[in-house]
């Protein structure tokens, strides 16, 4: 993943600071704009994990700090929800002028309410995703324990979740008390994904139901199971990112230029300027390979040996499926477990190599269904006829040569 930092004017005349997470290699499939939760920042761990997960799937994400928060300039106490919406529009304008218009709008908590309310200002966006978002902005006042605006015009010191206190103005209280979302959700002309945990104690899951019911199709709801509101566990945030990437691709790829592809039978690999994250193109499909963090990678995808084992395992399962279908046997499923390692050649009875160590793949099969013993034994034998198995055990010749400049795929 490549990361860049930007600074540009916000809605109140002070500078906003943003970070763009790009795919490690190649051009992004689309750009997304991420709005963080109330009093949070673009550097919240969950925001970073989600952004990096999306970048690994080819989606560039711009995450920014609202006025007065994080690295952005200005006084948070002078902002309100409407100025946050203006900040969003300012960020979208910057993206359109310097990068590309955002095709995906993502908002966490009150940021989710913001992207719903501002979606009409982004005509080129095709998808909106909310994470733990409230169905009405007034919910924030209940969370903060703040009632109606005071007559004396004084700012208030409030706390959120026992964290540090901060100041909100009477105009903030009055603005958040307004109904910013009802019409915006009902008139949303973009695909909607609602991500929410059923045990969210800050914004109850009933808010997800109200958003979902108010929106028109296409719309989807995905439960974040036992995640907390801030997605403090990395696994929860990355899961949200994976779901979001898979969902958004359906809508982004419909309207973007035809997706890059390579000829059937070919695979193209693209490595970046640094790190081990590598993009794999097979026909119109995109995969990501990487190395674990323990050896200096970012762990954004399977390792090369994981992919090697996957090739053998998937080929094995497909071969057994084809054979059972042809025989009309009641094979209901196949499970393949594979391990790769090194063994001493002397321990291999049927190997030609007699000294040193050799690569060894341990493959274990489980065939499921009401099969008799003869059928099960035959399927174990057929596993060795899988084409990838034969390739790995046969003589392989690999030639390497420079790819001529005119043969390089255009970016």
Image (cartoon, grey):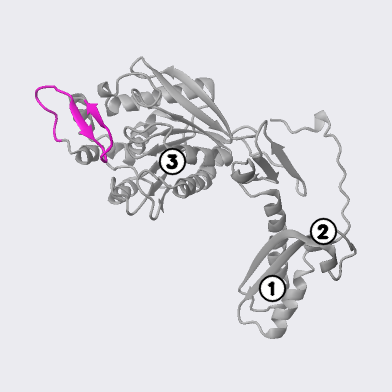
Asked whether disc 1 touches disc 2, contact meaning CB atoms under 8 Å apart, the reply is no
Query: What residue do we see at 77% from left, 46% from top?
Result: 266
Secondary structure beneath dot 3 equals: helix
Q: Is residue 57 left or right of residue 339?
A: left
| Residue 271 vs residue 89, the one in the foreground | 271
Q: Is residue 259 above or below residue 70?
A: below
| Residue 378 vs residue 346, the one in the foreground | 346
| Residue 274 vs residue 35, the one in the foreground | 274
| Residue 198 vs residue 167, the one in the foreground | 167
First to last magenta residue range: 147-168
- Dot 1: within a 10 Å radius of its alpha carbon, few (fewer than 14), some, or many (20 or more) residues? few
Dominant secondary-structure state across the stretch colored magenta: loop
User: Which quarter of the rendering shows the N terminus?
Assistant: top right
Query: Closer to the observer: label 3 or label 1?
Result: 3
Q: Is residue 159 magenta?
A: yes
The disc at residue 325 is 1
Q: CA distance from mark 1 to mark 2?
A: 39 Å
Q: Is residue 95 left or right of residue 155?
A: right
Asked whether disc 3 touches disc 1, contact meaning CB atoms under 8 Å apart, the reply is no
Q: CA distance from mark 3 to mark 1?
A: 46 Å
Residue 36 % position (x, y): 38, 34
Q: Residue furthest top?
A: 13
Q: Residue furthest left?
A: 151
Task: Name the residue tied to disc 3.
Answer: 46
Q: Is residue 257 magenta?
A: no
Task: Name the residue tied to disc 2.
Answer: 357
Q: Quadrant of residue 351?
A: bottom right
- Dot 3: within a 10 Å radius of its alpha carbon, few (fewer than 14), some, or many (20 or more) residues? many
């Amino acid at each position: 993943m490549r990361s860049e930092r930007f600074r540009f004017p916000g809605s109140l005349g002070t500078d906003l600071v943003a970070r763009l997470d790009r795919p490690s290699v190649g051009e992004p499939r689309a750009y997304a704009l991420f709005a963080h939760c109330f009093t949070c920042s673009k550097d919240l761990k969950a925001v970073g994990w989600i952004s990096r997960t999306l970048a690994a799937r080819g989606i560039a994400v711009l995450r920014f700090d609202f006025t007065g928060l994080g690295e952005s300039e200005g006084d948070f106490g002078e902002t309100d929800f409407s100025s946050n919406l203006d900040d969003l529009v300012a960020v979208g304008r910057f993206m359109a002028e310097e990068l590309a218009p955002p095709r995906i709008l993502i908002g966490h908590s009150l940021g989710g309410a913001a992207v719903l309310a501002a979606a009409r200002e982004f005509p080129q966006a095709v998808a909106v995703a909310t994470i733990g978002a409230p169905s009405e902005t007034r919910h924030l006042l209940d969370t903060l324990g703040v009632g109606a605006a005071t007559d004396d015009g004084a700012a208030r010191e409030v706390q959120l979740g026992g964290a540090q206190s901060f100041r909100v103005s009477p105009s903030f209280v009055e603005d958040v008390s307004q109904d910013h979302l009802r019409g915006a959700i009902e008139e949303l002309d973009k695909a909607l994904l609602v991500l929410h945990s059923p045990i969210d104690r800050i914004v109850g899951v009933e808010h997800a139901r109200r958003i979902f019911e108010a929106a028109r199709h296409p719309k989807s709801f995905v439960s974040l199971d036992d995640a907390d509101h801030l997605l403090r566990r990395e696994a929860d945030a990355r899961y949200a990112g994976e779901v979001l990437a898979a969902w958004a691709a359906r809508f982004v790829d419909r309207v973007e230029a035809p997706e890059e592809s390579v000829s059937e039978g070919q695979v193209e690999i693209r490595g970046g300027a640094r790190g081990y994250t590598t993009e794999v193109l097979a026909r119109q499909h995109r995969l990501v390979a990487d190395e674990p963090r323990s050896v200096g990678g970012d762990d954004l995808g399977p390792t090369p040996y994981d992919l090697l084992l996957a090739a053998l395992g998937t080929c094995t399962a497909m071969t057994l499926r084809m054979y059972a279908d042809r025989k009309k046997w009641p094979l209901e499923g196949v499970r393949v477990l594979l391990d790769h390692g090194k063994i001493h050649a002397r321990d291999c009875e049927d190997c030609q190599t007699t000294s040193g160590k050799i690569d060894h793949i341990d493959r274990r099969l489980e065939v499921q269904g009401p099969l008799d013993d003869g059928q099960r034994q035959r399927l174990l034998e057929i596993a060795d006829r899988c084409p990838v198995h034969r390739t790995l055990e046969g003589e392989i010749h690999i030639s390497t040569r420079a790819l001529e400049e005119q043969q390089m795929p255009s970016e």
